[in-house]
């Protein structure tokens, strides 16, 4: 009898160990192959089968929110952007991860990335990689990146000729412009409450901060004559790929094309704008792994998630697709990679894009304000900022 019970216990433990977890991912190409290789390794070491399912990026959030409570969603997702956290957390579908991680793990992650994956005071995912904009410069024109506004302006003007441009960027897009608002005093879009959570009733884009930032953006067109009318992302990006642009604000997603165009480029922070109180610092977008709060094999899902975001595996993930890890140890291993080294310095200056749902009501009025400011030399920046703030507050009901 005792022997029979032992055999039964062994069978049950093997069945549990050999359970199955499902992973949803939007990865493709070499990154998908990397994930499948990680899954095979985890299967061998844990006995747990891992099914990797490709789901279009745009479908993941709603499919997960609706499916998780019904038992119709994956055990974990690789990966989601941190600004989805608010909506997913409010739906109750994310497993809090704080109890599963060690102080040494958290110490290896850039603090700004931990902040990005924290909502309501809880860590709701494991940060893996990040992206932001930076000043990308063509070394044909710019040997060393400018460290001051005066150096930047001199370089930009010198290379603004009949056949080349000194500086262009997607001037009408708030995402590309946040660094200027931060430099003139906006810690983020919203202030934090006493518990460290973003408070949508306390908007930081208005007043003197907003006026100074918007005036500077306007001056890039009408005072400094650097970014002419009609310049958008496609125009600026195309000019840099064509080798006709010295400096651009852009992100790591553009670098593959720049390499194909054989542009010898460097990456640096944008210099502090004139009269600004803080260094320029962009929005940081962090992606990470989240676990389904309704998973029936939570332990295995968490263990696989932790495996994926180890410093060693984030190095191999970078080598597969070029993503920039938020692990300090991974960045140290990759320190000779100019892209990782350049963007890691910029990440340290950045702030996470707000991860609360109210942020969705900000983009439209903010973009309209920038467009109005750069439309005419005599635009009333103060009035534009006041109207923007009123419109945002009305939209979020605060």
Image: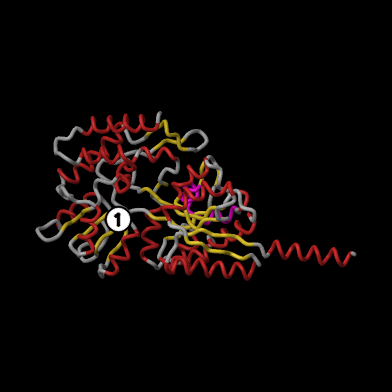
Residue 283's place in the image compared with 20, above or below, is above
Q: Quadrant of the C terminus?
A: top left
Is 253 left, or right, of 143 in this rendering? Answer: right
Residue at 28 percent across and 64 percent down: it is 265
Q: Quadrant of residue 310?
A: bottom right
Q: Residue furthest right?
A: 1
Residue at 40 percent across and 57 percent down: it is 344
Is 328 left, or right, of 350 in this rendering? Answer: right
Q: Position of residue 91 (x, y in %)?
A: 53, 42
Q: Position of residue 338 (x, y in %)?
A: 36, 65
The residue at which mark 1 appears reads as 250
Q: Position of residue 293 (x, y in %)?
A: 59, 48
Residue 16's place in the image compared with 199, above or below, is below
Label 1: state its secondary structure: strand
Residue at 57 percent across and 51 percent down: it is 292
Q: Quadrant of residue 206?
A: top left
> Is 270 in the magenta?
no
Q: Which of the two residues, 2 or 398, is positioned nearer the viewer here?
A: 2
Residue at 55 percent across and 53 percent down: it is 73
Badge 1, how many Cα within 10 Å: few under 14, some, many 20+?
many
């Amino acid at each position: 009898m005792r022997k029979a019970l032992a055999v039964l216990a062994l069978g049950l433990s093997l069945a549990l160990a050999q359970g199955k977890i499902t992973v949803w991912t939007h990865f493709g190409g070499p990154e998908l192959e990397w994930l499948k290789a990680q899954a095979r390794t985890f299967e061998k070491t844990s006995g747990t089968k891992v099914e990797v399912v490709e789901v279009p990026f745009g479908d993941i959030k709603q499919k997960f929110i609706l499916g998780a409570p019904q038992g119709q969603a994956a055990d974990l997702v690789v990966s989601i952007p941190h600004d989805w956290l608010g909506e997913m957390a409010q739906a109750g579908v994310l497993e809090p991860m704080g109890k599963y991680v060690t102080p040494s793990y958290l110490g290896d992650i850039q603090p700004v990335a931990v902040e990005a994956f924290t909502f309501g005071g809880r860590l709701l995912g494991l940060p893996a990689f990040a992206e932001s904009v930076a000043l990308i410069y063509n070394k044909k024109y710019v040997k060393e990146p400018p460290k001051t506004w005066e150096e930047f302006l001199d370089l930009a003007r010198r290379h603004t000729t009949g056949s080349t441009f000194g500086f262009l960027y997607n001037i009408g897009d708030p995402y590309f412009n946040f660094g200027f608002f931060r430099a003139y005093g906006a810690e983020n879009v919203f202030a934090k409450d006493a518990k460290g959570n973003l408070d949508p009733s306390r908007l930081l884009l208005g007043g003197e901060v907003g006026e100074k930032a918007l005036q500077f953006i306007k001056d890039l067109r009408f005072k400094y004559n650097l970014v002419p009318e009609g310049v958008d992302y496609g125009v600026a990006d195309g000019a840099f790929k064509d080798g006709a642009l010295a400096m651009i604000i852009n992100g790591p997603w553009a670098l593959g094309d720049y390499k194909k165009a054989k542009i010898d480029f460097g990456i640096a922070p944008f210099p502090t704008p004139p009269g600004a109180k803080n260094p320029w610092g962009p929005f940081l977008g962090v992606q990470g792994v989240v676990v389904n709060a309704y998973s029936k094999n939570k332990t295995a899902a968490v263990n696989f998630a932790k495996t994926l975001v180890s410093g060693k595996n984030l190095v191999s993930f970078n080598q597969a697709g070029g993503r920039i890890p938020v692990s300090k140890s991974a960045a140290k291993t990759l320190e000779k990679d100019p892209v990782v080294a350049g963007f890691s310095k910029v990440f340290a200056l950045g702030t996470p894009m707000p991860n609360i749902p109210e942020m969705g009501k900000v983009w439209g009025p903010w973009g309209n304000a920038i467009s109005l400011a750069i439309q005419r030399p005599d635009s009333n920046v103060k009035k534009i900022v006041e109207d923007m703030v009123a419109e945002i507050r009305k939209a979020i009901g605060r």
